[in-house]
Amino acid sequence: MKEFTFERSSRATDAAGAVAARPGVMLLAGGTTLVDLMKIDVLTPDTLVDVRPLGLSSIDVSDDAIAVGATVTNSQLAWHPVVRDRFPVLSEAILSGATTQIRNMATVAGNILQRTRCPYFRDVHASCNRRQPGSGCDALEGFNRGHAVLGVSDHCIATHPSDMCVAMIVLDANVHTVRPNGATRSIPFGKFHRTPGNTPHVEVTLEHGELITHIAIPNLPTRRSHYLKVRDRASYEFALASAAVVLDLDGDTIRAARLGLGGIATKPWRAIEAERSLAGRKASDDAFRDAAEIALAGAVAREHNGFKIELAKRTIVRAFANAREAKV
Amino acid sequence: MKTNIRVNNTIHQLSVDPRVTLLDALRDVLGLTGTKKGCDQGACGACTVIIDGQRILSCLTLVAACEGQHVVTIEGLAKGDELHPMQAAFLHWDGFQCGYCTPGQILSAVCAVQEVHAGVPSHVTRDVRQTVNSETLSDEEIRERMSGNLCRCAAYPNIVAAVRQVLSSGDSSTVARSAKVEVRS
């Protein structure tokens, strides 16, 4: 690990200011991504600012929404009784990721800002446009079984690894931030992450020195929501394909549906066209399959990850079917 | 830099390089070698300790970020010669072979039991709205809740049996005796 200085901050604007002052300053929260990547020299900050003393660790519940502090842990959020009751898709998504030890450390903002698990990103001897712009992408012609089929470019096919973010995107969450001068803004979750295009190293719409304070999640119109994750192991593994669904039913007719996809895309993916195709249809497996075809219509496979396209379609159908059958 | 931490009820003022992890501070600075270094990259769970009542990975925790926190390690579980019930259960059920992952397994299990008593769901809980019950908890639940601790000797069936025994004893105060476990939700 490269040397760095360690600072603690107790005010959000001070922490944001410390980062804005120099390019080599990074914020530390749970450390499950950052410390890991510093150990293998993928990230080499010269200063870390610990944001956990900022007091951004509460979940505020109101009648029509919840506000989740940036340093609320993944466990806190998944286990919160109101989250489990109003947003089961969010609890399910979080609990499907990592392990209890890691979820006890990892924060909500850290989960949103976590880096890809692409093995070429994690290997400083490999070419990776995300880690070192312009160096190329060894995944394109390498071992790409775990890589993305949606939102890819000729510069990067790395998968966004988060489960939680796939739920957040169908919940229409908003990411609230503050800058060193105290200016705040709210970024819709769907606009927060970027597809790689020809600048894969620019992963999110945050500016350097802009700090996440909390995530606002408005109530759903229905209690019927669900997260389904398919992976190589039963536990403690990233998704090969996952689907977050919200299903608003009027009898057996779909009033409205929402669909998020994970494990197959370069960012937390929202399948808007597929959602629209479901409105007004009977909640049948055929309708879900049609939506799945639409969701994956733009998929581009490489040598080893073509199986993910059919896997994702079946995951979508199963996720919607599970939501349809759920007792709510 | 200077960091004050409480380890097994003893306060230490450490003066360490910011790069030092909690794992290395426990082992190399404080001489508490019960906490094991397995993968050192957050994958195996051998380095599990309890901070402020919650199980975490000490290999991905910078000791500088532990200011004012209370750490419980495997050395802090027994009361003199009297083993913690989870330690006794691991011995009774032979929940290990080489023993390298065992300190992490035991600390993780202590917290897992407490989480079950708090009623919180896991990935395999049928409905996250349910409050889980220690009486009816399946082995699948125990395995999922312990999935952050790998055992290369594959003593898993006996580890599940040990956790089951402590869960069934129903005495959560005994379980949490030395390591006050909190479930924040």
Image: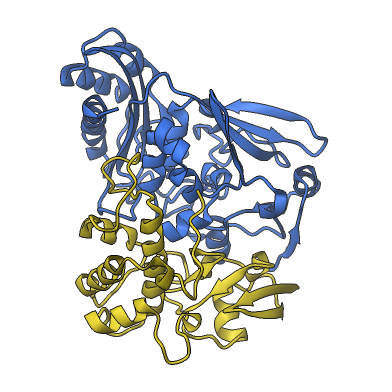
Using the image as rendered, state which of residue A172 and residue A263 is in the foreground. A172
Tell me the quadrant of the picture where the N terminus of chain B can be found: bottom right
Residue sitting at the far top: A280
Rendering coords of residue B92 (x, y %): 25, 83
The correct choice, above or below, for B127 with respect to B45 in the image is above
In this figure, what is the number of numbered marks? Answer: 0
Rendering coords of residue A181 (x, y %): 83, 35
What is the drawing colour of chain A? Answer: blue
The correct choice, above or below, for B50 with respect to A101 in the image is below
Residue sitting at the far bottom: B81
- Is residue B124 visible in this depiction of the protein? yes
Rendering coords of residue A224 (x, y %): 33, 26
Left or right of residue B168, residue A83 in this image: right
Using the image as rendered, state which of residue A220 and residue A128 is in the foreground. A220
- Is residue A115 visible in this depiction of the protein? no
What is the drawing colour of chain B? Answer: yellow
Question: Which residue is painted at 61% across and 27% down in the image?
Answer: A187
The correct choice, above or below, for A309 with respect to A201 in the image is above
Left or right of residue A223, residue B180 in this image: right
